[in-house]
Every structure is written in C-alpha cells, then in structure tokens.
Amino acid sequence: MERLRIDKWLWAARFYKTRSLATEEIDKGRVAVNGQEVKPAREVKVGDTVALRREGVTRTVIVKGLSGVRGPAPVAQQLYEETAESLQERERAAEQRRYAREPSLSIEHGRPTKRGRRELDEAQRQGWGDRWSASIDDDGSNKR
C-alpha cells in the first residue's frame, strides 16, 4: 500500500475517533496536506506533510507509514512524526492555557441556575447595577 485516503489515515493514526469526524474536519478546512487544503478523498503517501488544527493549535506531522486499519495507540503513533516546530507550538499553547485561562471559558451558557440568579439579584441590590452602565453619564434630559 503506497497511498491512502487522508480521512482514513487520520482515523487510523488516531487523530479523530471516527472517519466521519475526520471528514467533517477536512470539509471545514482544518486539514492541509503539503500546504494545500484537501478533500476527504485526497490520497497521502509516505513523506507527505499533514497540518491539522484542533482546539486552536496547529499540529504538523510527517507521514511515516500507512495503515487502513485502526490499531492500538502505540502502533498509530508509528504512522507519523511530529515536527519540532509543532511540538514547540503545542508546548507554548499548553503553557499559555495553564497561566492565562481563556476568559470566555468561565462564562456559563444558557440561563443562570437558581444559585446564580440569587447571586445576580444580591449584587444588584448592593448597587452593582448602579456602578456599571453602558451609556455615558447623562442627567436624563435627552429623553424624547
């Protein structure tokens, strides 16, 4: 076997849990082979460079082997070699996440819980709503 579909290789190398997830990521433009965006049927061969974006970090790997079956993780790791730049980028991103959490991750989505609602009400009662305003201080004279 000297060529294999990129979606099947990504699945066999354990970058994605299913081939359909690999196909979705490829269709979203998050996978490139030799610097070009690809389609799921694109074939890869040994020596190709594959760049894939996951969770905000781009991993760049060199294809070292091909396999049409998904095996254990140690076998899957022999199918590729990650570049030194990619390893440094992942370490830097992990360090950045460790020291400076993304502010949006702390925001709860959806309606507040009962406890959250009580905390909001208490904060407003204590004058929190008076201190923060999206408008410029006005005396109310510009009402229509």
Image (cartoon, helix red, strand yellow):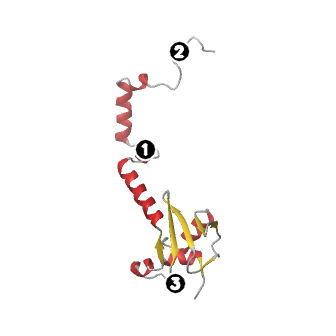
x%, y% of residue 111? 45, 43
Secondary element at image label 1 = helix
Q: Residue at x 42, y 42 (%)?
A: 112
The mark that comes first in sequence, 2 or 3, is: 3
Check if mark 2's residue and mark 3's residue have beta carbons within 8 Å.
no
Q: Which residue is mark 3?
A: 67
Q: Amino acid at mark 3?
A: Ser
* Residue projecting furthest to the front: 84
Q: Amino acid at mark 2?
A: Asp
From what the image shows, is residue 75 above or below residue 127?
below
The quadrant in which residue 128 appears is top left
Q: Quadrant of the N terminus?
A: bottom right
Q: Residue at x 47, y 68 (%)?
A: 83
Identify the mark at residue 103; answer none if there is no mark: 1
x%, y% of residue 24? 59, 66
From what the image shows, is residue 111 above or below residue 48?
above
Horizontal side of residue 114 vs 80, given as left or right: left
